[in-house]
Every structure is written in C-alpha cells, then in structure tokens.
Amino acid sequence: AHVSASNPSIVEVAFKGEKFSEAKLVYVDHLLDLAVLKISTYRIPAFAKAANLECDAKPVVGSPVGAYGHPFSLDYSGTRGIVSGNRYRWGRYWVQTDAAINSGNSGGPLINLDTGKVIGINSATYSKRMSEGLGFAVQMIRACRVFKLLENEVNPSPPYIPISFAADEQIQDELVVAAVYRKQPVVWPLNLGDRLSALAEEPEKKFKHQADLIHALRGRNGPVELLIERSGKMRTVIVTSKARPKLTGRIGVHASGIIFDTESLKDDEVMNPDDFLFIQSVAETSIGALSGVRAWGYLASVDGKAIKTTRELCTYLSSAEATDKKVNLVTRHVDWDYRAQTRYSSHEITVRNVKLVGPHAPKGCG
C-alpha cells in the first residue's frame, strides 16, 4: 500500500515480457500495508497462473522461503531464507524472515519453498546500517480475510474502535481500556480498566493486541458480543461494529507537494476538536517541504482563515495559484512549546499544481 496508494498516482502493472497497462485501485489498507488492484482479464496472458495462497495457517518458524520482487529495478529477482518468526510490531502482525528484502521488493510474494504457497507480502526491512537479515512481510492469513470480504462485496476496512488501550511493556498480551471516546460514529459501553478478552462466540481466540480485535471485527456490521473482564469478573457486553469508509473513496487536496485531507482519528475529540484538515503527506524536495511543512500535523489556518473542507481549500489555493499569490499556512503539530504540548508554525509558500486527488476525485475543485 505504501507504493500503490501514494497520491497523486497512476498505477500500472505488467506481466513478465508484457507491456505495462493501467490498473484500478480497488482497496487500500494502511493497517496491513495492503493494496488490491484490478486489471481487465484480457490483459492477463495465457501463461499467467493464479498464486496459491496460504490462508489457513501461520508460517512455521524455520520454513524455507523465497522473497521475490524487483529490488532496485532488478526485475523478477529472488532471495532465499527462512521464516524467523511471527512478530507483532508497529501495531500489526508480520512474518519475519532473513531472506533479503530491499527497496523494490515491496508487494512481492514471500513463498514457502516446501509448499509453493504464498505466506506473506513483502513490505519492510530494518535499516542495513542497524541490522542484517531482518525483513518483514504481511501475514497472508490476514490479507486473505480482506480478499474474501471483497469477493463477497463486503467492505473489509478496519472498524471504528472508539477506545484507546493502555500499553504495558511487561505485559504485552492484553487489552486494557485507557480511554473511551464518545464522538465517534459508534460508542461502546466500556469503562476504564475493562479488559477485552475475545468475541463471545469465539472465547478461545484471545485478544493479545489491538490488531486481533480489528481482525475479529472485519466484515462485521451491527451488534457484536464481546467477552470482557470488569472488576475481576467475566461478563459480556454488546458493542456496535461498523467499518470505516474505504480509503479509495477519500478526496484530498494537492498543492505544492502537500496533500491535505479530512483524516478521521479516534482521538479527534482530544487532539483535533476544531476539525482542522490533516496534512497527510509532503513530497521530498517539494515547495512544501522546502518551506518547512511537515506531514502528520493539522492545517490551522490559511492567510488567517480557518478552512475546514477540502473543496474550500482547493478553491482558495487555486485562486492564489492563478494570481501567483503566495499564501501563509499555519500548521499545528504535537511538539513542545511553553506550557503546551502542541506547537504552531507559520509557512509562506508559493502555490503550484493545485488539484483534488484520489481515485474518484473530480477535475478542478469539484
């Protein structure tokens, strides 16, 4: 997803020995680092074979694997190693391997060389300056859940989770409620200190991490019964499960290498009570980057005006671009300031290449 979902982008695919053709971005999942693409059947050559996916079991540590991809534009390259472990890092589950995974391997298959099945999708590696033989792939059993839901025309997006959980470095296998948010599309009847155990219908499948809860709720919409521990006693509560909107339906604004959108985060009532637009990304060496704008912050104002919709921002910046007028952006990030945990920064930028972006973005400013 970190490759195919970059905006603005045109995604093209090619089979070995064939020309590139444009593909449609069907689904993006940032939690799994997964993108699903669609191409016309007549573009698929006769020699192509469907991949055999391992959708039922986690990889066995020690299994021989091959990582395939196009590292550094070296087409159709493969490296060999073993499964080193199944890890939970950065809020998600991974297959860890010592097979070399480099820039360009992303999206390629990690194949069990004994069974021929794809057990993961190559995604990340630690810096070569810090480590050797530490590569990570998305677990196929979790990606398969998404594929099956898409086949059944069910939105597989992660659900709204109106809860934050307390992390304990000593005990890393339980979900303890630390905050309950009341302004999300769903509200759960949980209390501080509640421990989430499992789905009531699957009590043997214990939640160890938030990703387990998210995986269990994918594809479920409506009432769901959870098994929890409250005040030392086990009980059940009914919560509402609702999938977040597909990322492919979002529309952002691109200007001077910056992408703004209306990112909805579960703690917005604490971190973004004013509904500021979110700074999703800033391209390296772009006008925005050279002006000091950073991603993962909020747009507080433009020329002293609070602009809170993408179309309004697009219209304002388009007018500035047409008249070659510089604008002043005030941004807000979590950072130290005097008696405050947020810092505001001012950036004067030249406005260029203003447009709405996204798979379904209209031309102009809509």
Image: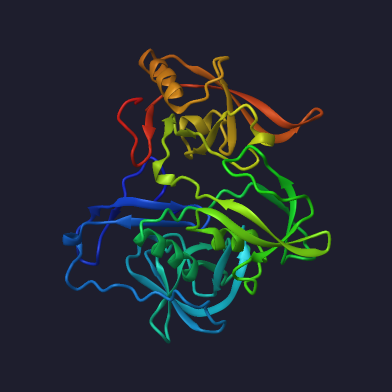
Q: Is residue 104 above or below residue 280?
A: below
Q: x, y (%) of residue 174?
A: 72, 64
Report if residue 71 is visible in the image: no
Q: x, y (%) of residue 351?
A: 43, 22
Report if residue 67 is visible in the image: yes
Q: x, y (%) of residue 238?
A: 63, 55
When asked about the image quadrant of residue 204, the answer is bottom right
Q: Decide if residue 180 is on the left or right side of residue 68.
A: right
Which residue, as the protein is rendered here, is positioned at the far bottom? 114
Q: Is residue 364 above or below residue 69?
A: above
Q: x, y (%) of residue 269?
A: 66, 35
Which quarter of the figure is the N terminus placed in?
bottom left
- Which one is nearer the viewer's eye here, 173 or 320? 173
Q: Decide if residue 210 is on the left or right side of residue 17.
A: right
Q: Residue at x 35, y 52 (%)?
A: 26
Q: Decide if residue 162 is on the left or right side of residue 74.
A: right
- Which one is nearer the viewer's eye here, 246 or 197? 197
- Which one is nearer the viewer's eye here, 327 or 236? 236
- Which one is nearer the viewer's eye here, 69 or 239? 239
When asked about the image quadrant of residue 143, the answer is bottom left
Q: Decide if residue 207 is on the left or right side of residue 250.
A: right
Counting labels gives: 0
Q: Is residue 160 above or below residue 149?
A: above
Which quarter of the figure is the C terminus placed in?
top left
Q: Residue at x 39, y 15 (%)?
A: 319
> Which coloring applies here?
rainbow
Q: Residue at x 44, y 61 (%)?
A: 146
